[in-house]
Amino acid sequence: MYEIAGKKIPSTLAEIVEPSQTALLIWDMEYAIGPNAFNYQDMMPKLKDLSALARRIGVRVFYSVQTGFDLAKEEAGVWVRIRMKRAKASDPSQLLKQKDDPHDREIIAELKPEPQDIVFQKRRPDAFVGTDFDLMLRSNGIKTVVISGVATEGGVEGTARSARNLGYDVVILKDCVGSRSRDLHEIALKLMEGSFFDITTAVELAAIWGEK
C-alpha cells in the first residue's frame, strides 16, 4: 500500500482487486451482442470460470443488458444516425421495420446469472449513463470494477473511463473483452493501456483470487 496524508492507496494488483471491495462487470454478453465478437469462443470459457470463482470468494458480479429507446418517441437524433450506419440504412424509417426478438436480450446460457448477481438495463455504451450502477456499487462498498465483455471499443472503454473519473479503480480483462472488429479491439486496448488503466488476464486475476 502507498500512503499519503494518512490515506492508504492500493499499490499492487492484488490490493486493487481485494474481493470485499471489487465487482466483476460482464458487459453485454447477451445473444444479440456477445457471440458476434471475433474472439467469443476464446473469451467465453475464461469468463465462465472467472465469474464462478468471483462468486465463491465474495466478489459481486454485475451484468449489463442493452435496452434501446423507442426510435420514434424517445431516441436522440445522433443515435438514430448511428443505428442507421450500423444497419446500413439510407432512411431512418427502415429501422422501424426491424423486429425485436426478446431472445436477443437474454444473457448467453453459459454465463447465466446466479441469484446473487445483479442484472441491470442500460441504453448507452457506458454503465454509468442513465443507470443506478454507481449507486449500486457504492451501496455495496465497491471501490474496484473489473470489466469484461463486448465491445472493447464501446461499452468496455466507455465504462472504464467513466468509472475512473468517478474515483473507482478499474481493471480491464484483456482476454475477456472482445469486439466484432479485431482492429478496433486492439486499438481500444492500446489506448487504455497507454492511458494507465490496469490491464490483466483472466489467468493472472484467478491466480490472485485463488489465494483468497
Image (tube, rainbow, N blue to C red):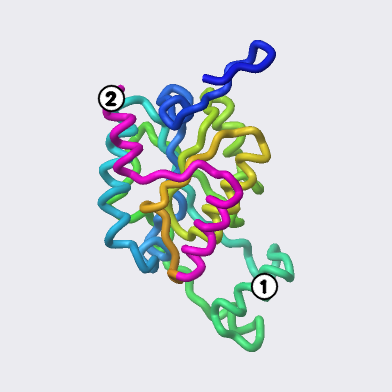
Label 1 sits on residue = 80
Magenta region includes residue 93 = no
Say which mark, if any, is on residue 9. Answer: none
Q: Position of residue 43 (x, y in %)?
A: 32, 55
Q: Secondary structure at mark 1?
A: helix
In the picture shown, does residue 93 fall above or below 5?
A: below
Q: What residue appears at the point 28 percent right and 28 percent down from the top-left corner?
A: 56
The residue under label 2 is which amino acid type?
A: Glu
Q: What residue appears at the point 50 percent right and 41 percent down from the top-left corner?
A: 198
Extreme-top residue of the structure:
6
Magenta region includes residue 197 = yes
Marks 2 and 1, Cα distance to the nearest angstrom?
A: 48 Å
Can residue 119 be seen at all in this image of the molecule? no
The residue under label 1 is which amino acid type?
A: Val
Viewer-closest of 87 and 49 = 49
The image quarter containing residue 9 is top right
Task: Answer few, some or many: residues within 10 Å of disc 2's Cα (few below 14, many 20 plus, some between 14 and 19).
Answer: few
Label 2 sits on residue = 211
**167 left or right, relative to 202:** right
In the picture shown, does residue 36 fall above or below 46?
A: below
Q: What residue appears at the point 43 percent right and 59 percent down from the top-left corner?
A: 105
Q: Position of residue 181 (x, y in %)?
A: 46, 71
Task: Answer few, some or many: residues within 10 Å of disc 1's Cα (few below 14, many 20 plus, some between 14 and 19).
Answer: some
Which residue range is magenta in the image? 183-212
Kindly indicate whether the residue at mark 1 contacts the one at mark 2 (C-beta within 8 angstroms): no
Viewer-closest of 207 and 24 = 207
